[in-house]
Image: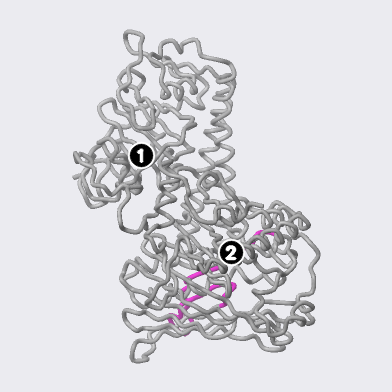
Amino acid sequence: MDASKARVLYSGWVLKKKKKRMQGYAKRWLIIFEDGVLSYSMDPESSSRGAIAVPHASVSSDVRHGTIHVDSGANVFHLKMLKESDFIVWRAELRKFLHQWVGEGTAPANMTNASEGSPASGTSLVLMDHADGLLESSIQSLSQLNASQSSLDIKNVIVALKQLQEQHGLIRQQLVRRPRESLSRSGTPANAGFLSPPSPGRDHLMAAGMSLRNSNGSVSPSFMDDGDHVFYDADDMMNGVEFEMRGEDEEQVDIVYDDDDDDDDYDDGRIVDAVDDSPVNTVVPSQRSIVYRTELPAPVTGEELSLFSILKKNVGKDLSTISFPVTFNCPLSLLQAAAEEYEYAPNLLERAAQSSDSVERMLLVGAFSVSGYASTAHRTTRKPFNPLLGETFECVRADRDMHFIAEKVVHRPPVVASYCFGKGWKVSSAISVKNKFWGKSLEFIAEGAQIVELDSGDKYSISKPSSFMRNLLAGNKYLEHVGEMVITNLRTDERLVIQFKEGTLFGGPANRNHIEGTMYDRNNGVMGTIKGKWDEQVARVMGKDHLQVLWEVDPLPPNPARYYGFTRFAISLNEITEDIKDVLPPTDTRLRPDQRALEQGDADRAEELKLVLENEQRERRKQLEESGQEYEPQWFHPGSDGLDWVYGSSDGREYFRERTSVERGHATWNVRGASIFQH
């Protein structure tokens, strides 16, 4: 039963804090009606579990943490948005029923603004909100249009609008902070004495320059949550008031994925950071919005040398045994190159997991497999760094609903094991690349297995084609993937065979990179086909003149050659952002000093550090051999069932479980090889 007879104004999924302490947040369906009633339920089809009349409540929001708190005096909804765009939309909808004192020329009678210049800043905020609304509306409209008639031009416009939206968000944060910063410099407001006793929650209200009193001149808190924010009785102040919180302290968010009522008197033990024996495969929304960089600290560094001049002296040798000058490298490692293959995985594999059509699921898995090559389109002159044994790399991206971990588990031939998961899917991989020099071209042969598992119960194995570096002797060098990719559904014996076609001698660039795929059932009957180019798009053939686009490549940054031909995603991989700087283990690639020096444009320093790290690695290997010991990886163990290396250490440790403990301050990293980057 609905909480209101009015029409629904807006609805969607959010995280709502459960009523009992220590029970964390749970996913709930939230509805705002045209009469201002805010209601939540377990899902869109369930009856309302509680409601608040927003026009008679106080609302506080924290843009940094993406939280909104709605207090009616008798009840409080503590809400956390799943993504930044949700926060913007929900806050805008709630503001329709509030006295927006922030941004008005005069504050309500029982409130004072202690910050000079706030009206001007507030007016700017109102204009920014209006612009944000227009941007969000435009993005949604174009996304719907692109879904019905996919176009690269439309997609480029969507990407540009999202970038503009990010910049608007940053500007708005600065506008929000400005009056508060001036307040903190000016000292304590004259009316601060009414706030007694002092508390961290009081600071949030003081920062907004407000005096909140009841009839006897004091302020009475009605509720305090685990984040130490104080909420005040709505009846003691003007109805429908909005506060903005500074959010200086990081809010710990425990998320419970269950169907229990918020009134349960027990903790069901399914909080994300609880320690149990099952793998951690829950995608946890980020507590803050991260804006990733769009260019590297320095452009391509170092003089490009002749790869052919080195290869001709090492004919027949495994290139992994050759120490190349650092200027043959780009500032990414093989571990990060493995992560690049998952740039489009969240979108494609989540759609596959949700599909009820086995043909569509297989073709989307095929599109994912092809999309992993798109990042190599402009990589023709530099190779990734060869990781040290025991080196790791994580890519935890809430904006992509993706958790990735990779580790170099074997030194020679180099083997990279990786594990990645998102909503409804997970992928395990253990790949080794061998090479052959053919005189004018260099062939890279991928050996090993990649296994994709969906919540539908389907499990796919993927074998990859060879890759060739062409024109090593003369002409424009380019990378080409040639051969057969076979994707097999291990549950149904259905398979998708994708041909990566070789370009013709005189066809030029336009004649390269084409793929065609055919799906067969267990009796070799044709079930579906795809076609496209691995550096542009993949489409399902629906009829003679009808194609359904499954995947399209995102546009490259301006002048990609300036930054090693990196995609926007690749540019972000070596960045140490605020959300991970205190969480990374000491073995993470981002902490490797020679690669960092090259990224910053110091090739001489990078070469010096590279030689030191390689010599120290040789010494460690020598000590292992002399002691008769074998290296044991940290986060993977030998497996079976078609996969040489499986996620999880031999003693049962799991990377993401330990990472969660480190992130929440419950533990510190205890890893072997913690000093591999020290020199």
The numbered mark, 1 or 2, whose residue comes first in the sequence reads: 1
Q: Which residue is mark 1?
A: 79
Quarter of the image with the N terminus is top left
The x and y percentages for residue 9 are 34, 43
Question: Residue at the front extreme?
Answer: 627
The residue drawn where x is 23% and y is 52% is: 45
The quarter of the displayed image where residue 375 is located = bottom right
* Residue 175, image x, y percentages: 57, 32
Tell me where the magenta segment starts and ends, as one range: 533-558
The colour scheme used to paint the residues is one colour
Mark 2 highlights which residue?
A: 623
Is residue 635 found inside the magenta-colored segment of the image? Answer: no
Question: Alpha-carbon distance for marks 1 and 2?
Answer: 55 Å
Q: Nearer the viewer, residue 66 or 299?
A: 299
Q: Sort mark 1 into few (<14), some (14-19) or many (20+) by Cα contacts within 10 Å.
A: many
Q: Position of residue 397 (x, y in %)?
A: 49, 54
The answer to which of 104 and 159 lies nearer the viewer is 159
Query: In the picture provided, is 576 more to the left or to the right than 6?
Result: right
Q: As displayed, is residue 26 above or below residue 445?
A: above
Under circle 1, the secondary element is: strand
In front of the other: 393 or 389: 389
Location of residue 645 in the rendering, given as x and y in whole percent from the top left corner: 44, 71
Q: Residue drawn at (45%, 58%), measured in percent from left and top?
A: 402
